[in-house]
Image (cartoon, grey):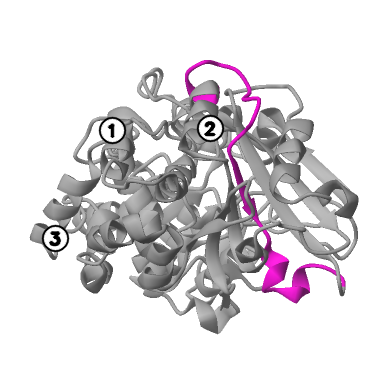
Amino acid sequence: MLDAVVVGAGPNGLTAAVELARRGFSVAVFEARDTVGGGARTEELTLPGFRHDPCAAAHPLGVNSPAFRALPLERYGLEWLHPELPMAHPFTDGSAAVLSRSVAETAASFGPRDAGAYRRLVEPFLPKWDTLVRDFMSLPSTALPRDPVTLARFGLTGLPPSTWLTSRFRDERAKTLFAGLVGHVMAPLNGFATGAIGLVFALAAHARGWPVARGGSQSISDALAAYLKDLGGEIHTDYEVKRLDDLPPARAYVFDTSPTALAKIAGFGDYYANYRYGPGVFKVDYALDGPVPWTAKEARTAGTVQIGADSTEINTALRAASRENRAPDRPFMITVQPSVVDPTRAPAGKHVFWAYGHVPSGWTGDLTDALERQLERFAPGFRDRVLARATAGPPELAARNANYVGGDIGSGAVSGLQILLRPKLSLSPYGTPHPAVFICSSSTPPGPGVHGMSGHNAAKAVWRRLRQA
């Protein structure tokens, strides 16, 4: 009998498996698709030689993850590549605000009226970042805070809505960039704890940047899988699990799946019926015959570029998708251009480019024209650079990754108390009605992102049970 079976070979499932195998437990992973990766994969979606990330592409939380940093992933081929600028936010006048590794450079891009306010916001937390991020991404039930005073101060700053936090800024440049940071998790700007979301992304950039993985996000998953195999773990692909009886006998079962899927497989009925999924996204992967022709020079060297003219336009787009059940006319966009720092992603002189906008859950329309009209505002002539495009709306994204219910790449709405308490109100969110069944997906704390911390935290709950059994 195995000690643990993990269902789903995304970053969280693989991390949970690694953490258990490192402690001497026998582990096997079962994945429905033909490759490992989940939200961290790389494929030729457009043309031969153009390697795209179907899901996550830039990894501020990955490079800062306490779980990943504790593992020898570099030994298994993971290499973080840092663009000259982690992120840029261009404006229609050709200028840009930036999120740089340097606090001073970032503050200066906001203008003299807001530079001081930004420094006062982030500088108190940076010296204690490693402890803060560990505390923030763990739970008291899995690890007691190492610095409860700093964590409490962070909570007082970040738990109010981001609009409260950005009220300290006087000009639109800082407000807009920060609004875009909150938009990465598809949360309306006036939601509970949205200030913390924006602040975490900013601090992550200053601490260790927003890198891409050399060769694509698949490198993260492949490194985890290779390490697991060296530890004696097994991985089985092309193995769809429809019920618990499909799995071999084990002392514990750990699911890197949506709560909805877990309830169906394990026969939990309506146990997760109140779990809410968020809006979807419409994503386009591009093969380009040259770099994106950004008007703002800062955007040309940034790994990630946010697109939204101002904070009002961003909030309007987020509200349209999440609360008004319509696709926005001018979508807020997250874009990533990995080949500005990784030439292995495209043939010589060519580029890959990744962009998405928010749409209602399950939306079946085509947002391509709206996205490209937005891009042309900040990069005139963009369409002339397009060699090929691969589009994916909510149905296609859900088909690629069953955890993306309705096209929700966050695997659950990041709003209200569900920002912190997911998938249920519980001090043991990784447990389920069955004492031997656990959940470790992005639907559990600390939530979305390629960081493995949900798997890391869940593994702690699992090995405590295995030691007691």
Left or right of 468? Residue 271 is right
N-terminal of the two: label 3 or label 1? 3
Q: Which residue is denoted by mark 2 in the rendering?
A: 313
Q: Residue at x 60, y 55 (%)?
A: 305
Up/down of 341 relative to 437, above or below = below
Q: Which residues are magenta?
A: 321-347
- Pointers 2 and 3 in contact (C-beta within 8 Å): no
Up/down of 249 relative to 40, above or below = above
Residue 274: percent from left, percent from top: 36, 20
Up/down of 17 relative to 174, above or below = below
Quadrant of the rendered image containing residue 438: top left
Q: Which residue is denoted by mark 1 in the rendering?
A: 192
Left or right of 49? Residue 461 is left
Left or right of 323? Residue 156 is left
Dot 3 lies on which element?
helix
N-terminal of the two: label 2 or label 1? 1
Q: Which residue is denoted by mark 3 in the rendering?
A: 150
**Circle 3: residue type:** Thr
